[in-house]
Image (cartoon, helix red, strand yellow):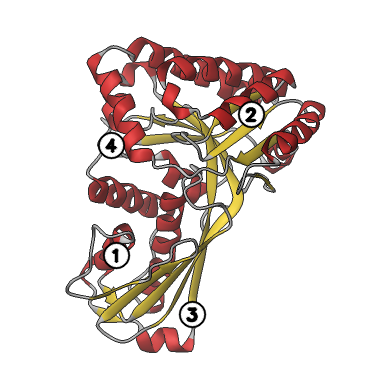
Amino acid sequence: MASQIKTALTSMLAKQQIEASAPCRIDSGGTWDIKAMALPLERIRPTTVNIALNLRTHVVLSPYKEGWVKISSDGFRKTEVFSKDHLSFDSAFGLFFAAISLFGFHGLAVNIRSESPVRSALGGSSTALVALIKALSKASDLLGYGRLSKQEMLHLGYHLEDGVSGGNCGLQDQAAAVYGGVNQWFWHYGDRTCPYERISLLDQQGQKALSDRILVAYSGTSHVSSRINRNWIRGFLSGKTRQGWIRVNEIVLDLAVAVKKENWAGAAGLVQEEMALRKRLTPEALIPVTSRLVRDAEKAGCGARFAGAGAGGSLWAIGDKKDIERLRERWASTIATIKGAEILDCQVDPAGVK
């Protein structure tokens, strides 16, 4: 691991910029990947199903003055610059400075560009972190220190984000960004060797079929997940909402089976069931426009669910191909007058970070 490197990348990057990218995700059963929930109830096999989307986040490393690090991102007005000995871990880009500090690099500029809307609940910050770790790993390899495996990138991405944010982060965002595809994840944080098990639900042909049977829309309203997740976890820890969450997990276990069998109508019905429970457990996750989009989907015979922690951000739907085509027209009409709202042109991303 490159944690002891104290290296200026300026000269190397002057000859060759380094690029990396990773996909974002939509999900069902998210929140169960948070260890405060998953660890005490490992006996019920806490699970999440997520789908990587080819709305990728790109990271480019370019040369900067030695001893300094600069980070900028599309969608953020401010560029941040710090000396290598005073990198900020609590600024807007603090998570990314922390990753660079871990590798011990300086003399570089980082630019982040995302094909998904900023703060759209599609796992954006985790996706950007995974892409950055991949780029830093490529730099490490060019310097002769070797590169990280996918498992190592996922391990570092999760623990960096969980540590810098103060805890209660899940693992599914980074997992989808690292591996891509359509996966079921089982969370077992009590296992000292690996906190997750990954089951690929669809091969590339199945992923192409699913791409025609999902629809993703951005509500036009950005979201902040940390505050929302804290409220959900408090309800779970107190016992007030725990039985509802356990039922959500049962539904997602069934959803994984339906997706694997390419039973799209069955999957739509299960997403409807999860959404009905989420309305009771997490009512703040829906805003007026996303509530209407959920109703539109159900009228069209599809199931729809907010992505991530909701409260704005994005929404996704699943159903038979003809129902999704009909829903596309309904959603386009619903969001036509909402500033910033849009149907996102995307498909399943099979590749993961690269």
Q: How far apart are marks 1 and 4 (CA)?
A: 20 Å
Q: Name the residue under label 4.
A: 168
Q: Is residue 135 left or right of residue 255?
A: left
Q: Which residue is drawn at 43% across and 83% down?
A: 13
Mark sitting earlier along the chain (1/4): 1
Q: Mark 3 points at which residue?
A: 17
Amino acid type of disc 3?
Gln
Question: Helix or strand or loop: what does disc 1 sit on?
Answer: helix
Q: Name the residue under label 1.
A: 97
Q: Distance between the residues labelled 4 and 3?
A: 35 Å
Amino acid type of disc 2?
Leu
Where residue 96 appears, as percent x and y from the top left, is: 33, 61
Which is nearer the eye, 235 or 63? 235
Q: Which residue is drawn at 48% across and 15% down?
A: 277
Q: Which of marks 2 and 1 is in front?
A: 2
Q: Mark 2 points at which residue?
A: 293
Question: Helix or strand or loop: what does disc 2 sit on?
Answer: helix
Which is nearer the eye, 304 or 222? 222
Q: How far apart are marks 1 and 3 (CA)?
A: 19 Å
Q: Which of marks 4 and 2 is in front?
A: 2
Mark sitting earlier along the chain (2/3): 3
Where residue 311 appears, as percent x and y from the top left, is: 46, 34
Amino acid type of disc 1?
Phe
Mark 3: few/some/many CA within 10 Å (<14, 14-19, 20+): some
Mark 4: few/some/many CA within 10 Å (<14, 14-19, 20+): some
Q: Do the residues labelled 4 and 3 touch (CB within 8 Å)?
A: no
Mark sitting earlier along the chain (1/3): 3
Q: Nearer the viewer, mark 2 or mark 3?
A: 2
- Vertical placement of 16 versus 26: above or below? below
Residue 29 appears in the picture as rendered: yes
Question: Helix or strand or loop: what does disc 3 sit on?
Answer: loop
